[in-house]
Image (spheres, rainbow, N blue to C red):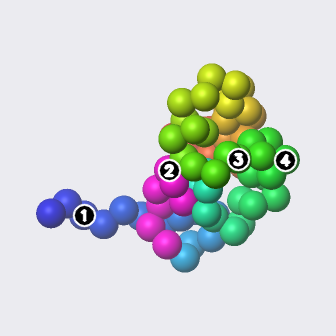
Amino acid sequence: MGPAAPPCPCCHQVEISVRHLLMECNALAEARRAFLNPPCNLQSLLTDLTYRKKLIAFGKHTGLYDAV
């Protein structure tokens, strides 16, 4: 078993994950609504090409783009 994931850099409450950042993190809720208006599931957000530019804009706005 590998080491545990680091905590979310935005809310510091749970382990960081793609799902948490894009769908669940309360600290990112406003930015998520403004940039992504996310669908009901992560798969749609990651596979629908209409979200590509929106994901990049969300990442840049939140500072996560440079952290990746």
Q: Looking at the image, is mark 3 or mark 1 earlier in the sequence?
A: 1
The structure residue drawn at horizontal position 67% and vertical position 35%, both measured from the top left corner, is: 55
Does 5 sit left or right of 38 as displayed? left
Q: Amino acid at mark 2?
A: Val
Which residue, given by chain and number where applicable, does mark 2 sit on? Answer: 18
CA separation, marks 3 and 4?
A: 10 Å
Q: Amino acid at mark 3?
A: Pro
Which residue, given by chain and number where applicable, does mark 4 sit on? Answer: 34
Q: Amino acid at mark 1?
A: Pro
* Category of crowding for the residue at label 3, using alpha-carbon neighbours closer than 10 angstroms: few (below 14), some (14–19), many (at least 20): some
Give the structural element (helix, strand or loop) at label 4. Answer: helix
Q: Looking at the image, is mark 1 or mark 4 earlier in the sequence?
A: 1
CA separation, marks 2 and 4?
A: 18 Å
Which residue, given by chain and number where applicable, does mark 1 sit on? Answer: 3
Q: Looking at the image, is mark 2 or mark 4 earlier in the sequence?
A: 2
Q: Position of residue 44 (x, y in %)?
A: 58, 38
Task: Using the image, tell me which numbered label, if any, was put on residue 38.
Answer: 3
The structure residue drawn at horizontal position 55% and vertical position 76%, both measured from the top left corner, is: 13
CA separation, marks 3 and 2?
A: 13 Å
Q: Which residues are magenta?
A: 14-20
Farthest residue in the bottom direction? 13
Q: Nearer the viewer, residue 15 or 29?
A: 29
